[in-house]
Amino acid sequence: MLDHTGPVVAAERNAARIFHADHLFFVTNGTSTSNKIVWQSTVAPGDVVVVDRNCHKSILHAITIIGAIPVFLMPTRNHYGIIGPIPLSEFSWENIERKIAANPFAETGARPRILTITQSTYDGVLYNVETIKEMLDGRIDRLHFDEAWLPHAPFHDFYRNYHAIGEDRALCAESMIFST
């Protein structure tokens, strides 16, 4: 599985065709390792990163291992303390710029290297990927959607705009999209 040749690469190419992805790689150890691979191949020490505050621990591990500077998008909570969705306003570029400016570890005007969103959350919260792409394409280098709980989404119209990669999905003009 660690050598992308022979039958493995043939299967990866077939899976990429099925999921309508430009490239697809099989990874052992699940989405946690996939998340770390995306991060360790695209984020450097000192890079500003934007993540949802309710992200998976593999993202927190990646931040720590790499030495990235996190800026968190804050989800809502109800009166029971149950975590809800991230408000749309948290995704606005102006809000993200304010959060970067307020972070004592971030350089003034730093451009975020990656945005990682948990899609869907453990509670079933989904975000409209097309809206996020519209708002942040070209402003953040990579848009990464941790879709560990959503691999079925590309195969049903109900989830049309709620997954990162699939048939008839518009590409970003500048940002690279990752789905794990």
Image (cartoon, rainbow, N blue to C red):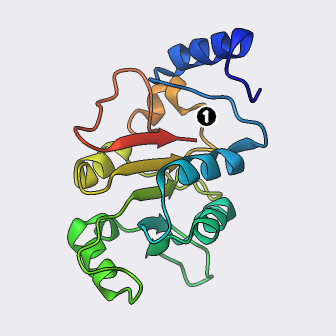
What is the x, y in percent for residue 88?
A: 32, 64
Residue in the image at 23% along x and 66% along y? 93
Residue closest to the eye, 3 or 147: 3
Q: For residue 151, what is the image quadrant?
A: top right
Residue closest to the eye, 121 or 16: 16
Q: Is residue 135 left or right of residue 114?
A: left
What is the x, y in percent for residue 8?
A: 71, 16
How packed mark 1 is, by other alpha carbons closer than 10 Å (few <14, some 14-19, many 20 or more), is few
Residue closest to the eye, 143 or 39: 39
Residue in the image at 54% along x and 33% along y? 153
Residue in the image at 61% along x and 50% along y? 35
What is the quadrant of the N terminus in the image?
A: top right
Q: Is residue 71 left or right of residue 27?
A: left
Q: For residue 34, what is the image quadrant?
A: top right
What is the x, y in percent for residue 87?
A: 37, 68
* Residue 137 visible at all: yes
Secondary structure of the residue carrying tag 1 is: loop
The amino acid type, in three-letter code, at marker 1 is Pro
Count of labels shown?
A: 1
Up the image or down, 160 lies above or below 56; here it is: above
Residue closest to the eye, 102 or 119: 102
* Residue 75 visible at all: no
> Badge 1 is on which residue?
151
What is the x, y in percent for residue 104?
A: 39, 90
Residue in the image at 50% along x and 28% along y? 154
